[in-house]
Each structure stands twice: as C-alpha cells, then as structure tokens.
Image: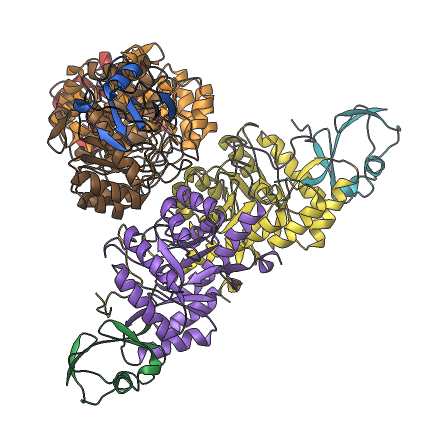
Chain colours: A red, B cyan, C blue, D green, E yellow, F purple, G orange, H brown
Amino acid sequence: MNVTVNGRHTDVASDATLADLVAQLCARPTGTAVAVNGDVVPRSAWSRQRIADGDALEVLAAVQGG
Amino acid sequence: MNVTVNGRHTDVASDATLADLVAQLCARPTGTAVAVNGDVVPRSAWSRQRIADGDALEVLAAVQGG
Amino acid sequence: MNVTVNGRHTDVASDATLADLVAQLCARPTGTAVAVNGDVVPRSAWSRQRIADGDALEVLAAVQGG
Amino acid sequence: MNVTVNGRHTDVASDATLADLVAQLCARPTGTAVAVNGDVVPRSAWSRQRIADGDALEVLAAVQGG
Amino acid sequence: MTSHADVFRIADATFGSRLIMGTGGAPSHEILESALKASGTELTTVAMRRVAPGEAGSLLDVITGLGIRLLPNTAGCFTAREAVLTAKLAREALQTDWLKLEVIADERTLLPDPVELLDAAEQLVDDGFLVLPYTNDDPVLARRLEQLGCAAVMPLGSPIGTGLGIRNPHNIGMIVEQAGVPVILDAGVGTASDAALAMELGCDAVLLASAVTRAQDPTRMAEAMAKAVEAGRLARLAGRIPKRFHAEASSPMEGRADLD
Amino acid sequence: MTSHADVFRIADATFGSRLIMGTGGAPSHEILESALKASGTELTTVAMRRVAPGEAGSLLDVITGLGIRLLPNTAGCFTAREAVLTAKLAREALQTDWLKLEVIADERTLLPDPVELLDAAEQLVDDGFLVLPYTNDDPVLARRLEQLGCAAVMPLGSPIGTGLGIRNPHNIGMIVEQAGVPVILDAGVGTASDAALAMELGCDAVLLASAVTRAQDPTRMAEAMAKAVEAGRLARLAGRIPKRFHAEASSPMEGRADLD
Amino acid sequence: MTSHADVFRIADATFGSRLIMGTGGAPSHEILESALKASGTELTTVAMRRVAPGEAGSLLDVITGLGIRLLPNTAGCFTAREAVLTAKLAREALQTDWLKLEVIADERTLLPDPVELLDAAEQLVDDGFLVLPYTNDDPVLARRLEQLGCAAVMPLGSPIGTGLGIRNPHNIGMIVEQAGVPVILDAGVGTASDAALAMELGCDAVLLASAVTRAQDPTRMAEAMAKAVEAGRLARLAGRIPKRFHAEASSPMEGRADLD
Amino acid sequence: MTSHADVFRIADATFGSRLIMGTGGAPSHEILESALKASGTELTTVAMRRVAPGEAGSLLDVITGLGIRLLPNTAGCFTAREAVLTAKLAREALQTDWLKLEVIADERTLLPDPVELLDAAEQLVDDGFLVLPYTNDDPVLARRLEQLGCAAVMPLGSPIGTGLGIRNPHNIGMIVEQAGVPVILDAGVGTASDAALAMELGCDAVLLASAVTRAQDPTRMAEAMAKAVEAGRLARLAGRIPKRFHAEASSPMEGRADLD
C-alpha cells in the first residue's frame, strides 16, 4: 500500500496502523505527533487508526529551535 | 427643515439644494467637497440635488496638514 | 600665638605641638595628616614639633569621594 | 664635493650655490624651500650661499596632503 | 550639473526636487508660502477638514500660486472606512487621485495601524487612486503595500512630530534594498542631517512638515532641508569611503624631510 | 539669500564657504581640480615633501588657478621640533604664515600628541604664524590651544581617514560651547550627513579630504559636502524643533468629518 | 536578596529567572545542556520537525532532565494555516498548550508577517493555546496581539540571528509603556549589554538562543546572559541617575585644603 | 565556576571583583555601607578634606569594617602641585601609596588637564606611589601615562556624574588594544548596561560612584553593577557572535512538515 510519510513515498502493510508506523520510525513514540492528510491524530487513536492507501502522513518531533 | 451640517443642527429652506448650502458656507466652492449621509456628491450634481429633512451633511475643504 | 588652621585664624598656646592641635580638632588622630606651610609632617613628628607663630596648617582626613 | 640632498649622497661642484642645486632639482624654484643642516635658507640668499662639503640639504615642495 | 539630471519619479510624474514638504504646523500662510518657496518642493500635502469660511481658499491659492502639486492626506483617520471616504472627498474637492494614505492607531503615537492601512490601500488602489501610504519601518508591511499596488512606500523615521530622526536605519536600509517602488522617508525628521541620512540610506525622497514649519525660522530651515536632501542624494550616488577602525593618512608618509 | 550674508572668519580673513577641502588622496590633479571646484572651497591644505620633479609646480598651479588660499600642513611630524621646522619651510616655500599644525603620536592612529602639539603651537604663535591646530576632541586641550593664541581649534570627529563621522558629539558640543575662536571639525567625516551634523553641533566649518578624494566619484561627493555644510549651518541658525518622546500631529485633529 | 523576591509571571506560571533561552543553534546536546544549566533558564523553546530517528528523544531528555518547561515554537511557518497546524501537532507531541507563535514573511529577514501573525494568534487563542507571539517592534501590532488575548508580547530587538542588539529602544520603550501583559525581548541580542539594556527599558524578560549557542564559549555566554538580565532588571528597579550634559562632582568641592 | 578563576590584578595585588566602587555621593554612611557590601567591591576611593570632627573616623570604620582596600584620590586638585601634596597627605593619613590621581581643568566639565596630569603622574611615580590616573579617552594620553609608569589607566566613559555612559566606544577600544597595564573605565557610567559594555570593550574593571550612590535605591543598583560587570567580563571572554546585516535562523529550515 503506497503512502507518503514525511514527504517520502513509502510502502506499508495493508493492515498497518499509525502505531505501527510510528514504532517503525522512532524508538520511543514520546514527543512525537502525527498528522494524516492535514489533520492531527491524537496518540490515543494511533493503535486503532488504520493507514489508507494514498494517505499523506507527517510524523513530527521536537528538535533544537528558536 | 432640520439637517446636520458638519455636526451642527441647522435649519434650511425646504427647497434648498446642495449648491445653495455650499454657497452659504463658503465664498468660493472651489476646493470643497460634500458628503450626504456618508456618500460623496460630485459638484456637478450640487445644483440638482435637493437636501432632505434629517440629512447629515459634511462639507470639507483643504487645510494645512501632513 | 596666631596661626591659620584649615584657613581659619586660630589662637594657640605658645608651646603647643602639632599633636596638641590635632587632638583638639579630632577625637582620634587616625586617618588624619598635617601639612605645615605646605610641607607634610609625619605623625611620628607631631609630638615633637612645636607650632610657630604665623604657621599655616592644614589638617586633613578622608571623606566620601570619587 | 659630497653632500646629502633629501637623504641621498650627491656629488656637487665645489663652487655650487643653493640656487644651482635647486635649479638642478626642479624646473621652477617657486613653491620650494631649502634647509641646510636644519636651518631654513631664504630664497633671497640661495644665489649667494655656497654649498659646503658634508652639508645635509633638504629641498621641499608642496604636495597633495591633509 | 550632476544633481539636475537626477529626476525623481512617482508613477508617470517627475520631480526636480526630492524634498516633499507638507503644509502642517505653519504659524501663518505668509510664513508657509515663504518656507514652501525656500524648500523648492514640487509636491505638498494638505488635510481635509470641515469648512471654516475664508481659510481653505487662500491655502490653495498659496500652493497653486507656487505651482506646487497637491497631495491630500487622510490624516486623523482611524479606520479604513474613514480613510476611504476622506480620500474620495479629497479627490472630488481637489480634482486629484493622488493621495497620502494615513490610517493611525491612536493619538498618542500617531503610528499607522497595519491592518486598517492595508485594507484602505487595497480599496483605494482598486478605486484608481495613486496611493502613497504612510507606514511604519517594517520591511514586511512595506512589501505588502507595494504588492497591493501602492505607487511608493513612505516609512517613518520616528513618530510624527517627535524630531527623533531615523531611529532604525537598519530597517530603512532593508526597505530600500527590497523596494521596487520609490521609498520616501516620512515623519520624524528633526534637522538637516536627518534628511541627508535618509537619502544616504537610499531613500528616493524625504517628506517632512513640522521640522520646517515649527522651526524657529521656518524659511531658513526649509532652505536647509532642500540642501540636505540634495547633499544626501549626491553622497549616495558618489559612493562614500568605507568605514575603517584604524586611521589612514591623507598626506603621504613617504618623502618626509629628515628634520630631527 | 540667508546663507550668503553668513560669512566665515578666521582672524582677519573672510570666506564665503565653510567647507575647507584638503588636497590629500586625490587620484590625479585633474580629478582634484574638478573636486576642488565642485566643493566651492576657498582654503585648501597641502603637505611639504622632498621635491619630486614636475609634480609640485602643477599642484600649486591647480590651486592658484582656482583662486584658493593655501594652508600648508605639518602632516607626518611626530615632534614639535619637526613641526616647527616644517612650518618654517612651508612659510618660505609658499609665502604664507597660515599653518595647519599637525603633530601626531603614531602612524596607526594618527592621533595628535597633546604635549608636542602644545609645545609646537606655542613656538609657532610666538614666531608669528597663524596656527590652526588639528587636535583631538578633548575640550581641555582645545581651550589650552586657544589660550596659546591659536586662530581656531580643529577637533577631530574620528581618526583621519576612518570615515567614522563624529564619534563623540557631546565633546564637540562642549568645545563649541566654550570656544572663543572658530571651531573647525577636522578629520573623520565619511559622508554628507556627518558634515551636516558637525555644523548643527555649532562648528564654524568642516575640513575634510579623504571623504571626497577617495570617494568613488570625488566631484559629486565634493558637491554633496558643499551642500551638506550649508544645510547644517542653516539648520543650526534656523533653530530646530525640540526632540519629543511622544508624537505631535502636524494635521489638526479638530474639524475632522464624522465619517464612521 | 532583592532579585529573588522579584518573580516573573506569565499567566499563572511564575519563574525565578527572567532569561528564556532557546535551544536553537547549539553544536551538540552536551554543549546545549551545559549552556542551559549555566543560563538558569526555566523555559526553553523547541521546534517541530519531521522525525529523525534517535535525535528527538535525547533533546527532550536533556530539557526535562534539567526540569525546564517546554515552549514549542512554530518557526519556519509562513502562513497562519501552517502555524496553527504546527501548534496543534506540538501540543499533541509535547502535551503543553504553551506556544511561541512565529509566522515569518521570508527567509532573508525572518521578520514576522503582521497579517498572518494576527490571524494565527486569534485562532490559537480561541483554541485554548497560551500564545507568546514573536512580533516586530511596532507598538500598534503589539497592542493588537494583546487585545487578541496573547499572554505576552515578544518584540524583536533586531532580526533573528543578527546580533545587532536593540535597534530601536524608543519603540521598545513605547511597547513597555502601554503593555498590560509581559513584554519579552525576543531576537537580536548579541551580547550581555544588549540583554541588560532590554531589561532597563522595562522588558519583563529576554528570550535568546544564537547569542549563547553560537558564541565561542556557549556555557560562559549563558552565564553572562543570566547575570546581564538580572543586572538590567535590578537597575530598572533601582532607578538610575538622570543623564546630564554637564559634570557633577562625586567628591565634595568644599573643604579642600589650600595647597597652592 | 568560570568567573571565579578570573582574578583582576593591579601591580601585585589581586582582586576577585572587577567593580571598584567609590564612596562619593552617598546620602549616609549607613546607605554607603549597605551599597558597598552589595557591590562586592574590594577597592574604594576616598577624598582628602579639612577635618570635620566625627565624620572621618566613622567613614574609615565602615570601609575597614568591610575589609575593603582604600584608594585615596586627589579630587578637586587643579594643578600638579596641589595633587602631589594632596597625595602625600593621603599617604601619610591612610598609610597607603595607592592613589587615584585626578587633576581637573575646571569645575564645569571636571575633565582632566592632560599637561598637569602628566606632570603630577611623573612626580608621584618617581616618589614611589602606585598611580591610577583618571584620564580622558585619548589613546595617546593613556599611552603616555603608561610610559610614565602608572599601574593602570582609567579613561572616562563620559564626564563625572553625567551618567551618559560610554560616549566613544571606539576610543576605549583603541586604548584597550594598545594598553600594557589594566584599563579601568572611570566616570560616566549611568546604568548596568554601561558597565557591561565597558567590560565587553575589553576594560579590565569599572570604577563608579554616583551611578550607585545617587540612584533611587543605591543598594539595589550596587547589586546591579556587580552583576553587570561580571556579565560584561564573561561575555568578552565567551566570544560574542558576529553582527550580521541579514537574519540567520536559529531553528532549522530543513525537515519542516508540508502543511499547506
């Protein structure tokens, strides 16, 4: 299933959840947030929410700044 | 007929035109402009346009400024 | 015997020493210095040195400053 | 006869005058001044004054400055 | 002579003088006339107010008598709505679509309100006015005003009437660097060196009123400002020497006599 | 016209221009001539150096051709002894007892040495020179130079050739306040607004060279400086408006239409 | 001790330190940790970026390890829309509704865009964020941000990373004079005296990052800034002496000996 | 901690504090004592005046009670002769050969007289005094004082008691650049940022009195000055970021989410 994660085309399993994806991307989910197609998805919903084909996902975390 | 001219209550003849009013207020009409109830009335229309009871008129001219 | 002390004409005993004068002027001599006719007289010499008629004496101490 | 002119060792005729020297150095003497061994020699004296062996001469003129 | 070839353009109009002198604050029409003449200005501002018999006419006579172009302003307007209506009245009264757009936020600072200013600028440009907005020294606001179609941007040096000169030359420099329309320093000039500095920073012109009209000798100060603006413009064009921490001799160190 | 009546005096000499332009640093005599002309200066400095055939003559031709008075300097002298002898040579060479006295402490700062300067000034005044000393911006040193009989005092704005302008307006203001002879700002001017500021602070004239001769376009900068000096002088005489923290409207707040 | 009683409040939170140090620009987490500690800051900014494995976690560990409160920013956002969404992601990621709102107009000046900034501020206040907006030094924009419900206003001293200090103290003074919420000087500080001056002008706190993180010795500069902010605050509270044109002796002139 | 290792040396004496606080201008001995304590100073100035019974003793008690070293001055002396005799009296009275040498030219400016100052410095150095001369900001005079054997040079920021801060940072910078002895900024400091700036320019210490003793709250201002001097010193050592005309982001521009 093809989705865009942080601007990169990625192939994910058809039954993958947001939780799966975040786990792949970073050791600890703490301090990260996810937007799917421009809407924030609260962490509490990650394990429920399945990724859909063509989704544009942004997974952000805090970095040095300001 | 009661109207407001430049913020002052004024009594004008029932058939008075803007031209009449401006003539009363200043020797020469050049350099003056009139707004009736918030709309600018071009000088060309002054002699035609009759003043209506309750009209709010602003008659402005250039002064030192800026 | 007439002398000038800090700009003021003063009468002192004919056998007065600098030590006597300083004692008169201030409770404790510490922190004071004396010039007689424009020369500094070390404290060690005060008890020996007699004041002469017409001497100009300056007795100074530290004050708030600078 | 050996002299120093503007810091350079120079050989001049034994009967040379300041006027001769200046003439050699610059087309027109106007605007120039001469010091011999640290003393200014007025132009009026140039034709009289002979140069002596070992003299240190400075011949100056106005240049762009200040 | 260098300076004369160097004309100043706003839209299609050209001006020989880069000093725009406003009429505000003059103690009398006589003094104003004398100062306007001494300033050599070719463009001057007026405000629109309720008619006070006699006054208005003679002011216009003074200005037109000197052959100076009129630039009505919207001084004293606090909202876009007030400013737009005032602009239309000015256009009708003075038969010009040139406008110094002023929308202030409060009477204490007389600083422009960015939001109302942008709103008014957009409406007036659409309505065919040639808009010269009085703005603060924010390069971003200046760019937005230019993008809306203003014919120039007129950043302040410091608040109106303070005479504090140019408080933030760095901002004026940034505005000049980016601007595609003339930059006119407006407000804050107190004395001649302020006006010269504005031009050295790259401004195309200087607009001032109080600095001249409220000076002890307005006519002489007008003359001072005229020369200062020319001086600053010429200095900008001439290319100043760089600033150095250490000294550099102007007289040669070589060829010095040995006199010790 | 106001500015013309306002002559500048040094001793018994009077000048129409308050800009004194030095000749140092010009890339060629042609450019120097053009810049001197554009500056309108009536007094110019030259240095004394060992003759380099051809050169000297033509420089004097340029200056005298323009009818400009000569002011020889003692640039490059480190001691009173050197300065005094250089002054005497200059007097003999140029037939003038006017002198710009310069006694510097080192080549890096080119700052005047107060002790040698005072020594030289005293000797030269006694010898009948009209002494115009280049000094730092210390009001006390300026007063001592005046007391010695100098015909003017010439404090620096900043070190020679730095173009840093007037680093300490407060000191220049104190010098002006106390001076009984003309105060001529000498050295440090970088651009037109610096020259205008000097005059606004109350200086009687400005002396500069590098700012013009080393500018990208010396002639245009000379013209800029001429206007800047006039502008600053006029502004000083005109009496500027006071500086205020808060704004003051130049358009009347009364009589505004009710348009909301 | 005077300074300790003097707590700094934003909304209901209180801080012992008036220095807010951002995390941007540090060469390493180790150096950042050392500098944060030396600064004594109790509030620090972070940006939100796409996850780069490993990094994020350790940064938060550093900050939380030091017990410093997090203030996420919206750095790099050019529109209200971007800023609002970034703010929501930050809130979700960091579990805080505190936000440094930054909406910039372009990458060259990094100056705030007044229009987008006001739009974003309004949306975020309505959405329950505690909004601390990075703004320019325009007193009018600062007032509008306060009126929208921002918990503080954070005017710049000069553009981000320039180290030019406070270019316009007059504007900062006007903002302080009118503000009903804390004024935090944000951006432009280059060295300790800049931070002290901000506090002397009446700012309630100073926010800086590059001045410390990009200094040659970040830890030492952090210590310098901590002391500078305290010094400036104390000086403001202590009531400085007035500025005088002429001198005033600190040693008595009376009682001097007659020694001549 | 960085700052503690960094001792300040004059001749063979070392000091932990780089703030030298004078005693002049304090409303009472109690307030003076409290301010001296808060300042953390280890060296303080006193003047010599004709005895006024009672006073003197208690002042010395305050100072010695705090373990602060005495630095008598020659305030109010107009000639080398007066200064030298005053110095000898001070040495006799206070049993120290340390001296703040002050020879002023007049009461209005209280500026040092270069000629009398050099004369007095030479005599006193020869007589075995440790001479700390109060001088103007002329780098040449500072160098001459150093060459005469003064243990430090103490240039002014601005005239005594004016609170105008450092009028000419360029000169102070030049003095620091060349000095082989400690440079102590003396006079003119008005508030904390002035003191910090002095240290950032490279001064080794700051001497002040009125700024603290005449502040509305002297003790708090003393604390402010103590921190400001430390802050400025640390900033100097830490190596500040360079000044840039354009902005530089402190948050990374890479890795931003695509949210539009």
Asked whether, in this view, residue E81 is left or right of residue G116, the answer is right
Tell me, yes or no, if residue G111 can be seen here.
yes
Picture coordinates of residue C63 (x, y %)? Answer: 30, 22
Picture coordinates of residue G133 (x, y %)? Answer: 37, 24
- Residue range in magenta is G247-251
Asked whether, in this view, residue E3 is left or right of residue F255, the answer is left
Q: Nearer the viewer, residue F57 or D44?
A: D44
In the rendered image, which quarter is residue G171 located in?
A: top left
Q: Nearer the viewer, residue H253 or F153?
A: F153
Up the image or down, H175 lies above or below G255; here it is: below
Asked whether, in this view, residue F126 is left or right of residue E195, the answer is left
Asked whether, in this view, residue E217 is left or right of residue H186, the answer is right
Up the image or down, F90 lies above or below E124; here it is: below
Up the image or down, F135 lies above or below F81; here it is: above
Picture coordinates of residue H132 (x, y %)? Answer: 22, 35
Q: Main secondary structure of the magenta part?
A: loop
